[in-house]
Amino acid sequence: MTLQRKSSRGGRARRSELLPLPARRARLVVLLLTVLAWSCLGLSGKGIAAQLAPDSVQAQLYQRLATTPLPPYLVVAGEHIRAPLALLHFYQRRAYQPAWTAGAVLLPQGTTLLAAIEAIDQEGLQPADYHLKQIRRLLSILRSAPARHHASRDLDAVVDLDLLLTDAFFLYTAHLLAGRIDPETDRTEWQASRRKIDLVSLLEHALATNQVVRVLRTAAPSHPLYVQLRQALAHYREIAAAGGWATVPDCPTLSPGDRAPCVPHLRARLRAEGFLASDRDAAAATDQYDDTLARAVRRFQRRYGLSPDAIVGPATRAALNVPATARARQIALNLERLRWLPRELPPRALVINIAGFSLEAWEHGRPVWNTRIVVGKEATATPVFSAPMTHLVLNPEWHLPHSIATKELLPRIRRNPNYLTAHRIQVLQRVNGKSTVIDPRTVNWRQLSAEYFPYRLRQEPGPTNSLGRIKFMLPNPFNIYLHDTPPHSRHLFENRVRTFSHGCIRVEEPLELATYVLRENPQWTQDTLVAALDRGTRRTVRLTSPLPVHIVYWTAWVDQEGVVQFRPDIYGYDTRLEKALRKPPPFL
């Protein structure tokens, strides 16, 4: 479920705009609850303010919040409140009592929250997004004030501090529980598994039970995927803080045994990231590309998704010369993506990493099997979403999408009249409300176009079928599925960058995958699957229970051996996410 965010166009609410109907209803409920709460105290209407000492924090909070116009648009100490509805709801339900302060003193729970904000960069987030600068300034004002009855300036500082800390708590927990941004607001082809969060009840419970520390510590995901990547972030930031690594200058392509002036630079670069132990002998300064250095280069290439051939060419040199600060930022971006995943991973699931060109079967949070995949070209990018796999189709037909039929096949058919027959593609036309197969020789293909194409093309099952012999179905709004690959296309799996499809995902080992997903059905073993495939007839096989599938886009992660892996940003999504995270946090 998506974390609800109430924001107007451009990310800034305007006073003249109306809240959506659900928000207006929620605000009305809050106001009614407030009246009820004050009634229990013997107060009502305009008499509320009169019952409070005018120089009390409670009275000032009431004056600030009770008269807030709709929609709530709050600025406190120059800072925009990012969770205005939750903040109003919270203070109304507690009769405008302060939460984090007692007089001019910051309570221990406020100190705990401040420390958490200061350390949130460990999660790859920016402390400045949580009002840190203004919170520190307000604390400085209060701590420097003489011990006397609060002047209005000091009272304002106490009120501002309490409000900013409350908003910071809401932001902190919301961002760590469900992600700082909603990916669907930036990419319509992204559907993240995000959650609704009752922020007000969460804070009320934390304060009432004195468990603010526990809530803050458990807000971030606890599964190993996240914990290990957070540790990697700290490691690469340490490298960057120590000066990072020097670049490897241009030189001819290096192979083991070569000599070149750039070899000492290569050795120093690999040593800085931990691929080589510290050299204390004369070998550190030699220009000999020896076996020890070659082994280190292979380890580097595996970590960065390069061919592990120990040859230092342009691609390897480019990866070597990405600064440590950029690698740390890459890790931080992927920590954000991990926050979009469900808090609890199911016992069994398939995790498909688009940027890693891999499919992994996960059991109890760990990969147990993997295979290579082919994903969409940049123009037909594979979308990111989660969906349950429900059934398989053996010996599937392929109903060609209109865009493929008109843009790719139509020119081929015009050049070769026998193209459709050679590839076992049928032409269907709607006749009397029914789809009827017609003879392709009766069609004037030169008169057709993308705007006028009254036919559908269907490829029959067989060795040339573009879907291969197995199709894995997971109902989703993008019409994306997994499938086999015909023999003439299997060479695509040998490429390092495998962006060749129209969006669907080609699986290198479909028979092994089918055996795995049907494991709970004893009727279907690898032998019975092969026998059914060899019969050549189309057959649907339903899974005993749906299998969760998460299609993700990770350019940095920690593998099952504990090794940090990096991959190129094939779709440019890292760049887009970086820009989104530089903007002020969206309104909650």
Image (tube, helix red, strand yellow):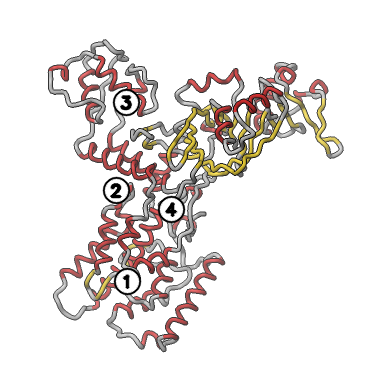
Q: Residue at x 40, y 31 (%)?
A: 568
- Neighbour tally class for label 4: few under 14, some 14-19, many 20 plus, Cα within 10 Å: many
Marks 2,4: beta carbons within 8 A: no
Q: Which residue is mark 4?
A: 178
Between 170 and 20, the one lying in front of the other is: 170
Q: Quadrant of residue 333?
A: top left
Q: Which residue is mark 1?
A: 99
Give how far apart the Cα atoms at labels 4 and 1 are. Answer: 24 Å
Q: Which residue is mark 2?
A: 122
- Counting from the top left corner in percent of width and height, residue 543 is at 62, 40
- For marks 2 and 4, the one nearer the N-term is 2
| Element under disc 1 | loop
Marks 4,3: beta carbons within 8 A: no
- Neighbour tally class for label 3: few under 14, some 14-19, many 20 plus, Cα within 10 Å: many
Q: Residue at x 38, y 35 (%)?
A: 560
State left or right for residue 509 relative to residue 399.
left
Give how far apart the Cα atoms at labels 2 and 3 are. Answer: 25 Å
Give how far apart the Cα atoms at labels 4 and 3 are. Answer: 33 Å
- Neighbour tally class for label 2: few under 14, some 14-19, many 20 plus, Cα within 10 Å: some
Question: Residue flagged by tag 4: what amino acid is it?
Answer: Ala
Q: Quadrant of the C terminus?
A: bottom left
